[in-house]
Amino acid sequence: MDISKSYPPTLFVHMPKDKRRSVRIARYLTLLQGKGIDVAEVKCMEFALSPTLLSDRVPGLDLATSVKLYSLFQEKDFVDTKGFMRNDGRAIQWKAALKESEIILPDKSIANHIQEEMNLAFAYHEMTSLQSEQIFHWFETHMS
């Protein structure tokens, strides 16, 4: 790869659980650093669900429903004892489990938002804004 000294500072934002992408980013980090390029990475890590996480992050979802959903996820073994997703939210049958339960969402479209929050929590390959402050700070410190 032909990289000139004038190559701009580069920030990689990724989810390390995506091993294929992580290997490529590690290679590019080493390559760019070796050329004297200012380079950094922001790792978007998995995080645990909690009884309040969904009501905190999903507009229109109340605390009582969030607690019930978290209990359902525990009951169905979708999360481990610490609240971490066992599998990608796209791969588990949480919507089927929801239909079998007595939990009623205030609006069916909320299910899509819940799905996205589960995807973020699993942190395999997803778009995220959770690290925005860190990302913006990096750019602010690298503007000339």
Image (tube, helix red, strand yellow):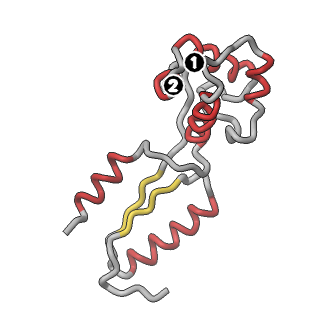
- According to the picture, the residue beneath numbered tag 1 turns out to be 66
Cα–Cα span, label 2 and label 1: 7 Å
43 versus 48 height, above or below:
below
- According to the picture, the residue beneath numbered tag 2 turns out to be 53
Query: Residue 105: image x %, image y %?
Result: 64, 18
Q: Quadrant of residue 98?
A: top right
Q: Amino acid at mark 2?
A: Leu
Query: Residue 66: image x %, image y %?
Result: 57, 18
Nearest the viewer among 112 and 94 is 112
Q: Is residue 12 left or right of residue 21?
A: left
Nearest the viewer among 118 and 95 is 95
- Around disc 1, counting alpha carbons within 10 Å, would you say few (fewer than 14), some (14 to 19), or many (20 or more)? many
Q: Is residue 34 left or right of residue 76?
A: left
Find numbered disc 1 in the image and state the secondary structure of the residue it sits on. Answer: helix
Q: Which mark is residue 48?
A: none
Q: Amino acid at mark 1?
A: Ser
* Pointer 2 with pointer 1, Cβ within 8 A: yes
Residue beneath the point at 34% across and 49% down: 134
State the residue lying farthest toward the left: 144
Residue beneath the point at 58% across and 33% down: 113
115 versus 76 height, above or below:
below
Residue beneath the point at 52% across and 50% down: 127
Q: Earlier in the sequence, mark 2 or mark 1?
A: 2
